[in-house]
Image (cartoon, grey):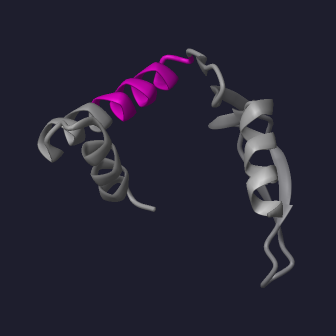
């Protein structure tokens, strides 16, 4: 599913135009990204929690040359899915 598919679905269910819906979706995504750039945590109840996690420096191995490579510490965005979301997906996939 793409962003365009999401816009189509929301647009048809809310009665908003596709242009208005696209602006809302784009605004939501930009807000989430901007907040995470500042290190903020975003909690959407029933969906999940977005947060930035610090990954420590580590030693990895190049599979082609078998040479050790140092991967520097980095900050990565993560999404921890809510319990309700997990249960809902699991239930629908088992049918």
What is the quadrant of the N terminus in the image? bottom left
Look at the picture and state if 91 lies above or below 19. below
Q: Is residue 4 magenta?
A: no
**Residue numbers of the magenta segment:** 27-39
Q: How many marks?
A: 0
Q: Is residue 72 left or right of residue 60?
A: left
Residue 62 appears left or right of 26: right
Residue 61 % position (x, y): 84, 68
The residue sitting at 23% across, 38% down in the picture is: 21
Quarter of the figure with the C terminus: bottom right
Decide: is 2 above or below 16: below
User: Does residue 14 lie above or below 45 as drawn?
Assistant: below
Q: Position of residue 33 (x, y in %)?
A: 43, 30
Magenta stretch containing residue 36, yes or no?
yes
State the residue lying farthest toward the bottom. 64
Could you say which is closer to the camera, residue 7 or residue 63? 7
Q: What kind of secondary structure does the magenta stretch mostly adopt?
A: helix
Q: Position of residue 44 (x, y in %)?
A: 58, 21
Residue at (35% x, 53% y) in the render: 3
Of residue 16 and residue 39, the one placed in the foreground of this image is 16
- Residue 34 image-quadrant placement: top left
- Looking at the image, which residue is at 79% across and 73% down? 62
């Amino acid at each position: 599913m793409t962003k365009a598919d999401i816009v189509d679905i929301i647009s048809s269910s809310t009665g908003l135009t596709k242009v208005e819906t696209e602006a809302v979706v784009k605004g939501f995504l930009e807000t989430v990204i901007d907040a995470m750039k500042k290190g903020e945590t975003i909690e959407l109840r029933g969906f999940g929690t977005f947060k930035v996690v610090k990954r420590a420096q580590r030693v990895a191995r190049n599979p082609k040359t078998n040479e050790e490579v140092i991967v520097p510490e980095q900050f990565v965005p993560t999404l921890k899915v809510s319990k309700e979301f997990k249960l809902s997906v699991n239930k629908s996939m088992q049918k």
